[in-house]
Image (cartoon, rainbow, N blue to C red):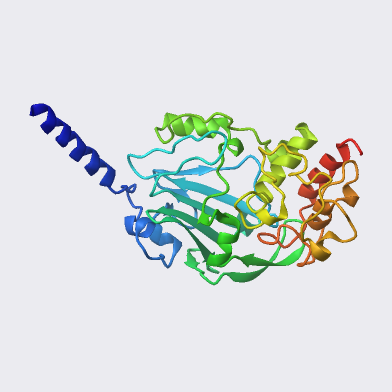
């Protein structure tokens, strides 16, 4: 009898624990993170003591990626919010398992020093219903950012002096890059693209259960010349292209799978004919022709600014000279067939 009572009590406690909602760090708004609505301004979340300065409150961790996504030369300020009493969970080399209540914050900025200008902040919220992606555009005074569900266009100049029209994605366009099997998911903070140092610091702070196996594999982009041509190019393709060109994603019908872990040459495009590239293929026949980068559709599309040809379709308006050079070197070093 006593045993059954203890068992029932244990079950009740377990159910109560499972039902406990995430708790937010001091100054962070529970309603903004986990409510059903869309906060009107970035400051409403309470991620930062000083929103304009991006000074994070305790529980909000700044981080960087070894190899970042190219966004017309924008600097990125990245942060992740962990609910109180919870932990991020290691899950191999791939995406870390983020608990409900997590927020991922990424601000795009152009310019340096006093001339730096914050352009937009993208917020990814892990709610009970799943991940929600919201874009915010910074005001002219640089004091706060306002929700921009319809997106925006902003005239800017890249760090290399190229004028272009910067596109803030609308809420639905966020899904084009973040959707896998119909669900919105984060695409950046994979263990293989995070440093051992950062992950160990999270473990020391009790924010992560353990440093994941397979972490810190992608080369640091600034040091890519010391990495192999294949490592630099494959890291670039994984970060810039694989969120669409992978099974279950929006461009899965291309037959390309450009994820880091893919080792099938045909899936990577080697001597693979395009499925439906149309005029995007130009006069070329194969996605990747070993030893011949200028005959490869993959590089041809990366080098184009034509909206009907250029790849990636979203997230950039200018050609990434450094990225295309990394891919060119990789293809050139492949033994010709």
Percent across and percent down for residue 172 are 55, 66
Res 246 visible: yes
Residue that sits furthest to the left in the current view: 1
Compared to residue 134, the image places residue 88 above or below, namely: above
| Nearer the observer, 244 or 147 | 244
Which quarter of the picture shows residue 92? top right
Which quarter of the picture shows residue 114? bottom right
Percent across and percent down for residue 271 are 84, 45
Compared to residue 93, the image places residue 273 above or below, namely: below
- The N terminus lies in quadrant: top left
Horizontal relation, residue 81 to residue 160: left or right: left
Q: How many marks?
A: 0
Percent across and percent down for residue 299 are 82, 52
Which quarter of the picture shows residue 224? top right
Q: Residue at x 45, y 30 (%)?
A: 203
Q: Residue at x 57, y 49 (%)?
A: 187
Compared to residue 5, the image places residue 175 above or below, namely: below
| Nearer the observer, 211 or 200 | 211
| Nearer the observer, 94 or 204 | 94
Compared to residue 77, the image places residue 152 above or below, namely: below
- The C terminus lies in quadrant: top right
Percent across and percent down for residue 276 are 77, 61
| Nearer the observer, 142 or 128 | 128
Q: Residue at x 66, y 66 (%)?
A: 166
Res 119 visible: no
């Amino acid at each position: 009898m006593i045993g059954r009572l203890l068992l029932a009590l244990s079950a009740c406690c377990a159910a109560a624990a499972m039902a406990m909602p995430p708790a937010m760090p001091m100054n962070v708004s529970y309603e903004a993170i986990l409510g059903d609505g869309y906060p009107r301004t970035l400051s409403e979340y309470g991620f930062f003591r000083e929103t304009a300065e991006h000074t994070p409150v305790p529980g909000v961790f700044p981080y960087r990626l070894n190899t970042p996504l190219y966004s017309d030369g924008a600097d990125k300020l990245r942060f992740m919010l962990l609910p109180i009493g919870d932990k991020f969970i290691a899950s191999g080399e791939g995406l870390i398992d983020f608990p409900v209540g997590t927020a991922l914050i990424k601000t795009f900025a152009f310019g340096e020093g006093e001339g730096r200008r914050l352009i937009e902040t993208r917020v990814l919220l892990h709610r009970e219903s799943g991940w929600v992606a919201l874009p915010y555009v910074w005001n002219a005074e640089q004091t706060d950012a306002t929700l921009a569900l319809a997106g925006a266009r902003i005239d800017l100049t890249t760090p290399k002096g190229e004028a272009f029209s910067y596109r803030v994605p609308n809420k639905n366009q966020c899904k084009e890059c973040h959707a896998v099997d119909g669900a919105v998911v984060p695409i950046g903070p994979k263990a293989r693209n995070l440093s051992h140092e950062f992950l160990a610091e999270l473990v020391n702070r009790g924010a992560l259960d353990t440093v994941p196996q397979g972490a810190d594999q992608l080369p640091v982009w600034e040091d890519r010349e010391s990495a192999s041509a294949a490592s630099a190019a494959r890291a670039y393709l994984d970060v810039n292209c694989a969120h669409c060109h992978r099974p279950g994603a929006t461009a899965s019908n291309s037959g390309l799978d450009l994820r880091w872990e893919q080792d099938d040459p045909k899936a990577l495009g080697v001597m693979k004919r395009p499925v439906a590239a149309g005029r995007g293929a130009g006069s070329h026949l194969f996605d990747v022709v070993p030893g011949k980068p200028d005959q490869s559709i993959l590089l041809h599309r990366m080098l184009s600014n034509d909206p009907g040809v250029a790849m990636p379709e979203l997230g950039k308006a200018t050609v990434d000279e450094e990225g295309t050079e990394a891919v060119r070197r990789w293809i050139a070093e492949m033994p010709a067939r």
